Amino acid sequence: MSPELVRLLVQATLDTLQMVAVAASLGTLIGLPLGVFLATSGRGELLAAPWLNRVLGLVVNATRSTPFIILVVAIIPFTRLIAGTSIGTTAATVPLTVAATPFIARLVEGAIREVDGGLVEAARAFGASPLQIVLKVLIPEALPGIVLGLTLAVVSLIGFSAMVGAVGGGGLGDLGIRYGYQRFMPEMMLAVVVVLIVLVQLVQTLGDRLARRMNKRLRHG
Amino acid sequence: MTAPVRVPVDLGHRPGGADALVRIENVAKTYTARRGAGAVTALEDIDLTVPRGRVLGVIGRSGAGKSTLIRLVNGLERPSRGRVIVDGAEISRLSESALRRERRGIGMIFQHFNLLSARTAAGNVALPLEVAGADKGAIRTRVAELLDLVGLGPQADRYPAELSGGQKQRVGIARALATNPKVLLSDEATSALDPETTRSILDLLGRINRDLGLTILLITHEMAVIRAIAHEVAVLDGGRIAESGDVFEVFTRPKAAITRTFLDEETGRALPPALAARLTPGPATAGEGKQAVLRITFRGPHATDPVLAQLTRDVGIPAGILSGTVDEIAGRPFGTLVVGIPPEPETVRRASDFLAARGLDVELLGTLDLAGWQRSAAPTDLIHVA
């Protein structure tokens, strides 16, 4: 590959990393509290608000059931409102975040629900408030599960980010389609795929390791 | 939160003088099923008091309502009717936030310990203090003090996964004591432990009750637990209290059938299964190979009297031991012997009179038919009192 193509590949990798990092960060920022709320606001639960729980559950499901590529197109007005444009790396971050948030919320919800109810009961018994229970019991105990969930979300985002290339989003997917496919450069296609595989491998290994270190349930944690 | 481990207070051993720290008055608890199906009554007509400084044990089978009962005391459950009062505060009517403050005065330990896996032993003990807003230095001092109290000083930095069951429960106890509670609730605290560990945990609870004057309300399905540390007992059956009172009185003179079934699980009080199968309850009937079966209960000073020897020597009635035990309940000696004697009504009457005159409780269990049992295996021949 010519130096020019290598430069393109590096730039596309950086773009992808930027999109994924921003979308994952914003998605966690909103998705984590949302997931905690979904896990604790059902009828008779810690922060019981069954109505809000149901409404948010519906919104989350609606977003999750819309195919990503359709979501990207459907929210173009919203993307313009936020990013000022609907084309490019920055603009692509908007639909990525919108897709990541409910996904992360559901994963966090699942991890929180895994926490033994006995711990919540014990915390109530020594006088902890619902907020204290969430912050000092539920989240710390669910942390290994949350980290694994976030790892999964980041891996999925890397895949999604390749798709925004189709609508002018930039990044590795865009490079693969424009050079690898449309200009028929198999070596570029191969390079893009290899970089994606390496990225996913790295993220997964890192996430697994972090989760294992946090999990004190194992004797050799 | 810097308060030191409490100095022994008056333990309330004055007869009848102890005031009630926990009062459960005319309580009922009903659960309404979500859709359709009728309500489930968990508790009915519960009146119970735990005197300050005492240990009250509630014993019952699973489903008897024990868990619900103990959770009424710290407001984890609210009664459908009646009042729950702890040290003057009406728990059953407090708002959630008032209840949270009150709960700092009520410690609780659990069957499955309920420790946070992500926190060390010290971190778990510190949690109630953090929640109560104590400052860091005070927490560190108090946690070290508590871990020493339960004998876990060296394990302070271990995670629950690195501790044994008994050690986990010690952490649970230290955590429950962190905020200097007035009363400790124990929810089947030893049910997940082996007998030896159970004994050491019960010893620890007994010591805490004596040394710190801490009032304890415990629920269990095991007689051994009640016998080891309770002063008073309530027997719960089908959501009602079948009987209650001083442990020694209730267990040596049980009135309710359910209490007897708990006692019969103790070795020596009931016939071994092979013999029980050959027992016909009711008045003694004479016949070849038959014996009348008496259960003799020894209380207090008579527990070790050689009454069977006297029965044979002074009255001329031979008695064979079928089963027996001598132990103590609430620190007082207590024994049971199940014996076989000749089944003639006159003999049975004379034996009963003789034993009753010596202050023993005698109960005729029925007639044992040993005809057909291999002669050499007949228990009266194995252990014959000459």
Image (tube, coloured by chain):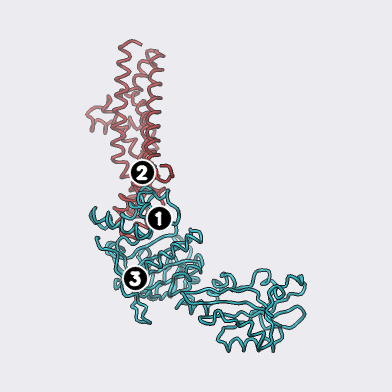
Chain colours: A red, B cyan
User: Residue A143: horizontal and vertical position, in percent?
Assistant: 36, 43
For disc 3, the neighbor class at 10 Å (few under 14, some 14 to 19, many from 20) is: many
- Residue labelled with disc 1: B114
Residues at discs 2 and 3 both on one chain: no
> In the rendered structure, which amino acid carries the disc numbered 3?
Gly
Answer with mark 1 or mark 3, whichever residue precedes in sequence.
1
> In the rendered structure, which amino acid carries the disc numbered 1?
Asn
- Chain letter behind tag 1: B
- Residue labelled with disc 3: B213
User: Residue A113: horizontal and vertical position, in percent?
Assistant: 40, 48
Alpha carbon separation for disc pair 1 and 3: 25 Å
Element type at mark 1: loop
> In the rendered structure, which amino acid carries the disc numbered 2?
Leu
Residue drawn at x 30%, y 12% as measured from the top left: A4
Nearest the viewer among A67 and B305 is B305
Quadrant including the C terminus of chain B: bottom right
Nearest the viewer among B307 and B357 is B307
For disc 2, the neighbor class at 10 Å (few under 14, some 14 to 19, many from 20) is: some
Whether residue A41 appears in this view of the structure is no
Question: Given contact means CB atoms under 8 Å apart, are the residues at marks 2 and 3 in contact?
Answer: no
Q: Is residue A63 above or below residue B189?
A: above
Query: What is the number of the mark on residue A143?
Result: 2
Residues at discs 1 and 3 both on one chain: yes
Element type at mark 3: loop
Question: Given contact means CB atoms under 8 Å apart, are the residues at marks 1 and 2 in contact?
Answer: no
Residue drawn at x 43%, y 62% as measured from the top left: B201
Alpha carbon separation for disc pair 2 and 3: 40 Å
- State the image quarter where residue B246 is shown: bottom left
Q: Is residue A82 above or below residue B246?
A: above
Quadrant including the N terminus of chain B: bottom left
Element type at mark 2: helix
Alpha carbon separation for disc pair 1 and 2: 17 Å
